[in-house]
């Protein structure tokens, strides 16, 4: 049942993602991923169907241990969709993004506290969330297993640390 819900959510987000916009970029959380991401995603940004079986995803690990699998678009230059995997217990630094993004939790339990809060509602597999551009937040995997989630963004990715 959870797999069906996650697949339905992914299909809905992918369908919605085919008309898009753009903003600026800064991505220290993903340093070194641009070239690999472009190769993985840019060929999938056309108007035709996109099929990405789980076993065929190309996971790219950054120096912090987070992993990314790009499935459509180009996160370095515009609209895109990607799977993200955080190790159990992983927490990003306080940050924000220039544009809104939408997410669906596929596995594990995620928390996305806003502003100066250290906690927020727990988001188990099957949960949807969105973060408005310019909103300060953390993203935290609070489960004992890795967290996997899908992100849809109508603009290029940026990661702006907040001090």
Image (tube, helix red, strand yellow):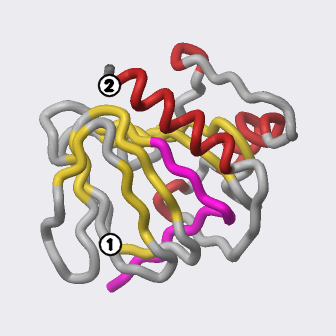
The N terminus, quarter of image: top left
For residue 51, above or below residue 88: above
Residue 132: percent from left, percent from top:
47, 74
- In the image, 58 versus 147, the foreground residue is 147
The C terminus, quarter of image: bottom left
Q: Is 151 placed left or right of 130 in the picture? A: right
Mark 1 nearby-residue class (10 Å; few <14, some 14–19, many ≥20): many
Q: What whole-number distance in Å separates the C-alpha atoms at marks 1 and 2?
A: 27 Å
Q: Is 114 placed left or right of 55 in the picture? A: left
Q: Is residue 159 magenta?
A: yes
User: Which is more N-terminal, label 2 or label 1?
Assistant: 2
For residue 77, above or below residue 126: below
For residue 123, above or below residue 11: below
The residue carrying mark 2 is: 2
Snapshot quadrant of residue 50 = top right
- In the image, 99 versus 15, the foreground residue is 15
Residue drawn at (57%, 68%), measured in percent from left and top? Answer: 158
Residue drawn at (58%, 45%), measured in percent from left and top? Answer: 13
Q: Which residues are magenta?
A: 150-163
The local secondary structure at tag 2 comes to: helix
Residue drawn at (32%, 45%), measured in percent from left and top? Answer: 127
Q: Is 24 placed left or right of 153 in the picture? A: right
Residue 115: percent from left, percent from top:
27, 81
Residue drawn at (60%, 71%), measured in percent from left and top? Answer: 26
The local secondary structure at tag 1 comes to: loop
The residue carrying mark 1 is: 137
Q: Is residue 68 magenta?
A: no
- Marks 1 and 2: which is nearer the front? 2
Q: Residue furthest right?
A: 47
Name the disc covering residue 158, or none: none
Residue 69: percent from left, percent from top:
56, 35
């Amino acid at each position: 049942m959870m797999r069906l819900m996650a697949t339905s959510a992914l299909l809905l987000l992918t369908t919605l993602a085919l008309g898009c916009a753009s903003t600026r970029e800064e991505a220290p959380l993903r340093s070194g991923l641009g070239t690999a991401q472009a190769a993985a995603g840019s060929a999938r940004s056309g108007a035709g169907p996109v099929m990405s079986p789980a076993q065929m995803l190309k996971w790219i690990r950054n120096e912090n241990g987070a992993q990314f699998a790009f499935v459509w678009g180009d996160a370095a230059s515009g609209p895109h969709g990607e799977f993200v995997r955080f190790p159990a217990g992983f927490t990003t630094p306080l940050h924000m993004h220039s544009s809104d993004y939408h997410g669906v939790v596929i596995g594990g339990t995620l928390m996305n506290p806003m502003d100066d809060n250290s906690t927020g509602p727990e988001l188990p597999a099957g949960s949807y969330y969105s973060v408005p551009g310019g909103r300060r937040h953390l993203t935290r995997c609070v489960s004992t297993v890795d967290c996997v989630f899908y992100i849809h963004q109508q603009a290029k990715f940026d990661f702006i640390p907040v001090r």
